[in-house]
Image (spheres, rainbow, N blue to C red):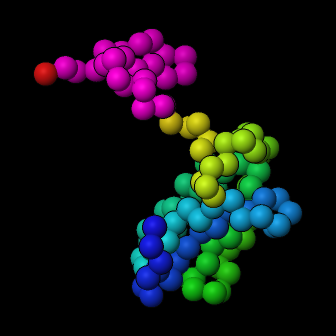
Amino acid sequence: MAKTAEDNFRIEVWDREEQALSETISRSPDSTVSQAAWQAAIRRRPGMLLIHYNSRHVMEKILTPGEVKIPPQTMIEGSVHAGLALPLGTFANGMCCGPGADPVRTMQR
């Protein structure tokens, strides 16, 4: 995501000790979009330190509840892959199943 002069709002994910930046989740010129991303980040990044900025001003800073569920080896190029979505290969054969769900055939044309 390229940083522009209009990207005033951003959300960063840090480790609990605020020693290492894990990722920047969102950059946006829109406060409403940034607030929505903030709420989603709180739910999707348990046990991480989130910092919400408006330019250089810290608007919100929170250590999210819960334990970190992401093993360190899933940190790839500054991005945390939490395994919250299904892998793309799941859809290759037209079948998809979520946790505890029965397989469902996707519509084929």
The quarter in which the C terminus is drawn is top left
The answer to which of 23 and 40 lies nearer the viewer is 23
Query: In x, y percent, where is residue 80?
Result: 62, 50
> Going by the image, does 17 lie left or right of 72?
right
> Going by the image, does 65 lie left or right of 53?
right
Magenta stretch: includes residue 84: no
Q: Residue at x 49, y 62 (%)?
A: 36
The answer to which of 36 and 28 lies nearer the viewer is 28
Helix, strand or loop for the magenta stretch, by majority = loop
Residue 17 lies in quadrant = bottom right
Is residue 3 depicted above or below 96 in this figure? below
Q: Residue at x 55, y 54 (%)?
A: 40
Is residue 103 depicted above or below 22 in this figure? above
Res 86 visible: yes
- The outermost residue toward the left is 109
Residue 70 lies in quadrant = top right
Magenta stretch: includes residue 91: yes
> Going by the image, does 62 lie left or right of 93?
right
Is residue 18 depicted above or below 5 in this figure? above
> Going by the image, does 79 lie left or right of 29?
right
The answer to which of 72 and 10 lies nearer the viewer is 72
Query: In x, y percent, where is residue 76?
Result: 62, 49
The answer to which of 78 and 58 lies nearer the viewer is 78
Q: Residue at x 61, y 78 (%)?
A: 53
Res 31 visible: no
The range drawn in magenta is 86-108
Query: In x, y percent, where is residue 27?
Result: 49, 71
- The outermost residue toward the front is 77
